[in-house]
Amino acid sequence: MSKPDPVRSQKLSRVGPGQYSGGRPQKNLRCHSGASSVAASDCMKVTLLLLLLVLLLLVVVVVLLLLLLLLVLVLLVLLLLLVLLLLLLLLVLVLVLLVLLLLLLVLVLLLLLLVLLVLVLLLLLVLLLLLLVLLLLSLFRTRWRPL
């Protein structure tokens, strides 16, 4: 004779809805969470709450990432404005230097013109003195004799 199967020969007694002692629980009627078991509707509620919590966490992470991206964009715009302001300041400085160089060039040209005018006046004075000497010589009619 064959030996009887100990699991089959065990009397199954009902412990709770969907579960028997010595047997397996019926599927889709109970949701096991650690040592305690919860009814299927409560398990579905817990699963939905966990899904909502994960979704809320994802929304919070996405919002924080978007805020961080917005902050980075604002900082980049501020940096760009600062660079543009520095370039504008540099341009103004270069323009001021160019105007100062132009003024210096004008002053040098005016100084050269003044020097040229003084030289012309000195030349005229020398010519006038020479003319005066010639006039005086012609008035006295002196003859020049070689030595």
Image: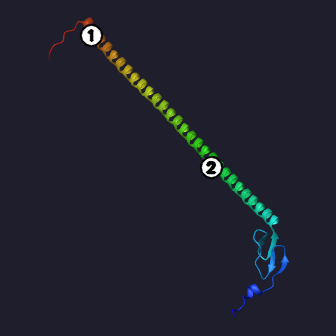
Residue holding disc 1: 134
Badge 2 element:
helix
Q: Residues within 10 Å of mark 1 (few under 14, many from 20)?
A: few
Rounded to the nearest angstrom, the CA distance separating label 1 from label 2 is 91 Å
| Near-viewer residue (43 or 89) | 43
Q: Residue furthest bottom?
A: 1
Relative placement, left or right, of 60 versus 86 is right
Residue holding disc 2: 72
Q: Closer to the N terminus: mark 1 or mark 2?
A: 2
Give the residue type that dot 1 points to.
Leu
**From the viewer's perspective, is the residue at label 1 or at label 2 nearer?**
2
Place of residue 87 in the rendered image (x, y in percent of width and height, measured from the top left): 53, 39
Residue at x-position 69% and y-position 54%? 64
On the rendered image, what quadrant is the N terminus found in?
bottom right
Say the numbered circle drawn on residue 1: none
* Up-down relation of residue 133 to residue 94 (above or below): above
Residue at x-position 26% and y-position 10%? 134
* Up-down relation of residue 63 to residue 104 (above or below): below
Give the residue type that dot 2 points to.
Val
Place of residue 47 in the rendered image (x, y in percent of width and height, measured from the top left): 76, 63
